[in-house]
Image (cartoon, rainbow, N blue to C red):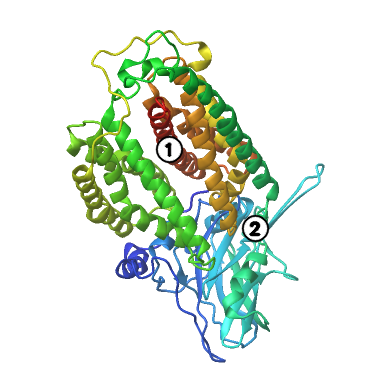
């Protein structure tokens, strides 16, 4: 079902325009605390509707044939709320603070046959609605469906026309709100119900329904500062997030084993290598016995600069940017800067931090590019700035076009698109250029313990288990296995309806992921050098960076076996942004892998002539 947005362009953009001026002020959505006196009006905003199993397929509430004001007035939204698909508009519900109301009439509406069919399809697709009262989301189903029996088969579809609002308060503030349909009978929407006889008081050929509501206020002992706990305890959507210690223990055991392998076994091997290679007491690195084999014999080639230097440096720069961005987001979450009552706060913070950390990518990329004797530093800056932004723009264009075609609220308004483009063109790209210029001017010489000869050494034929594909399989699977359990909870948050609050565990898992990636990279690099293969530069990036491939494969598994998502709209968004997620992990882990391998190689060749 793909309902079209039934709002004029002026009505649709009224609220959206206002948020542009306040976007930076509302970026982190720390907000103000609303206080009421008895009898004060409490505004209830209608927001969106959509299939229960497709979280990202949402439509404006007023696309359904429901009670709506003559002039739709939208609430001023933050950037994060717009990105989250929110389109809040004032409703006809008349709610006053601490004043109960019983069976109040909202409106009486006569539905055409087409509108009844639209509602029937919405109910059959398990459409739910989301209202917002004092920044508290309120969820409920649009209607009721019952399947029973095989012979005879019974298929009943009904519309909820009465809602009971239960609101909790403490002092002068609202603590929690929900809606219920207990002891309420739905209006039948079965095929032909009421259309020929005008049931519920309607004229022939139409179905007339009367929408009503009741309001009940309950005092709560919970203070306003802790009302987020009340929302977490409420379970309209299924709860699966728990403190999963088994995942952490599994990851920690893997890290201990890997560290033990790298530190104990690998260092013992290196100790034997040093003892064998440091027999000579005179001469530098260039005077080593060429009759030996192993990693010592390629000392004049191991620091030979790789092909595609600009692309390698761009990968390292953008990877460093995302490492900074991810760390910043997790730290901000640990500091309590993201309130679960504020929609899209993490989205806003991620966009702003991505723009501000662009200087990190420019600096790291251009600095290392200069160190390895790169000449086209301007092209390097352009490549760095577009390495992620170009795939992001392409993916977003496809996803947004699908949402726009279906009338989904996930389609960004033109004002939001211009705002995001402006943020990249006026903040992100200039900071990348500034960071690149500073990195170029402050770059020193490349620290190589051994000189590189002009003529490269011939690389012997390698066994099959030292090929790139095998290293990518090993280097990608082990970091993925360390986060595989936690990855389910992250997917349930991003592609579900969970509120992720276990940021301390997330920080631990993030550190475990980076540690495992670094350890695996060092081990694989040593085995590569032991085979007299000095092409470690790109190999170190690809080995652990291949974790992104495993993450995308897991996303396919999650879509097919762990979720109930379906339809073109949800599928395009899921797989499009899953590809971008895999790219981000590949860039981050490829950067960590490369830096760990570089530090390891410098260490072993610097220690080659120990006394």
Residue 583 is labelled as 1
Residue at 75% over, 71% down: 183
- Quarter location, residue 163: bottom right
Tell me the quarter of the image containing the C terminus: top left
Where residue 279 sits in the image (x, y, percent)?
44, 17
Q: Position of residue 43 (x, y in %)?
A: 50, 79
Q: Report the front residue among 511 and 380.
A: 511
Give the residue pinned by disc 2. Answer: 237
Q: What element carries label 2?
A: loop
Please state the horizontal and vertical placement of residue 584, each as a whole percent of the image: 43, 41
Residue 454 versus residue 595 in the image, above or below: above
The quarter holding residue 285 reads top left
In terms of sequence position, does the residue under pointer 1 or pointer 2 come before the other?
2
| Alpha carbons under labels 1 and 2: distance apart | 30 Å
Packing grade of label 1 (10 A; few <14, some 14-19, many >=20) is many
* Residue lying at 40% horizontally and 70% vertically, measured from the top left: 74
């Amino acid at each position: 079902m793909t309902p079209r947005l039934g709002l004029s362009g002026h009505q649709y953009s009224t609220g959206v325009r206002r948020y542009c001026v306040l976007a930076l002020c509302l970026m982190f959505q720390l907000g103000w605390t609303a206080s009421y006196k008895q009898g004060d009006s409490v505004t209830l905003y209608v927001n969106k509707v959509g299939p229960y199993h497709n979280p990202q397929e949402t439509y404006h509430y007023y696309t359904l044939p429901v009670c709506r004001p003559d002039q739709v007035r939208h609430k001023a939204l933050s950037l994060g709320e717009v990105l989250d698909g929110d389109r809040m508009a004032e409703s006809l519900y008349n709610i006053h603070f601490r004043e109960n109301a019983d069976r109040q009439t909202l409106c009486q509406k006569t539905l055409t046959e087409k509108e009844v069919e639209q509602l029937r399809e919405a109910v059959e697709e398990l459409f739910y609605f989301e209202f917002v009262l004092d920044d508290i989301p309120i969820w409920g189903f649009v209607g009721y469906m019952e399947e029973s029996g095989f012979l005879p088969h019974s298929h009943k579809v009904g519309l909820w026309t009465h809602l009971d609002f239960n609101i909790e308060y403490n002092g002068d503030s609202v603590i929690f709100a929900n809606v219920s349909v207990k002891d309420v009978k739905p209006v039948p929407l079965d095929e032909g119900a009421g259309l020929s006889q005008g049931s519920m008081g309607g004229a022939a050929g139409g179905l007339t329904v009367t929408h009503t509501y009741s309001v009940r206020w309950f005092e709560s002992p919970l203070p306003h500062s802790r009302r987020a706990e009340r929302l977490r305890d409420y379970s309209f959507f299924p709860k699966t997030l728990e403190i999963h210690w088994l995942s952490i223990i599994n990851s920690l055991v893997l890290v201990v084993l890997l560290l033990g392998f790298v530190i104990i076994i690998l260092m013992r091997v290196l100790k034997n290598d040093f003892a064998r290679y440091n027999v000579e007491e005179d001469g530098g690195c260039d005077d080593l016995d060429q009759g030996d084999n192993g990693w010592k014999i390629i000392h004049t080639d191991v620091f030979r600069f790789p092909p595609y230097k600009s692309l390698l440096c761009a990968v390292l720069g953008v990877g460093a940017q995302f490492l900074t961005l991810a760390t910043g987001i997790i730290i901000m979450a640990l500091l309590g800067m993201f309130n679960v009552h504020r929609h899209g706060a993490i989205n806003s913070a991620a966009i702003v931090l991505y723009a501000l950390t662009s200087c990190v990518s420019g600096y790291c990329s251009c600095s290392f590019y200069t160190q390895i004797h790169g000449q086209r530093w301007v092209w390097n800056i352009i490549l760095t700035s577009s390495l992620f932004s170009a795939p992001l723009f392409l993916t977003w264009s496809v996803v947004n076009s699908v949402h726009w075609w279906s009338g989904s609220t996930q389609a960004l308004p033109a004002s939001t698109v211009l705002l995001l483009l402006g943020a990249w063109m006026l903040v992100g790209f200039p900071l990348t250029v500034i960071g690149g210029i500073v990195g170029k001017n402050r770059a020193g010489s490349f620290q190589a313990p051994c000189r590189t000869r002009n003529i490269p050494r011939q690389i012997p034929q390698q066994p099959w288990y030292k090929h790139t594909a095998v290293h990518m399989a090993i280097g990608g699977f082990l970091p993925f296995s360390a986060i595989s359990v936690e990855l389910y909870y992250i997917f349930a948050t991003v592609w579900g309806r969970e509120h992720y609050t276990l940021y301390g565990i997330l920080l631990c898992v993030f550190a475990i992921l980076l540690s495992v990636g670094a350890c695996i990279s060092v081990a694989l690099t040593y085995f590569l050098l032991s085979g007299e293969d000095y092409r470690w530069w790109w190999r170190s990036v690809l080995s652990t960076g291949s974790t992104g491939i495993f993450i995308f494969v897991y996303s396919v598994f999650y879509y097919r076996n762990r979720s109930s998502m379906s339809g073109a709209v949800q599928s395009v968004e899921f797989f499009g942004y899953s590809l971008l997620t895999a790219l981000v992990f590949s860039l981050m882990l490829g950067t960590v892998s490369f830096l760990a391998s570089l530090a390891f190689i410098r260490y072993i060749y610097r220690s080659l002539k120990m006394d």
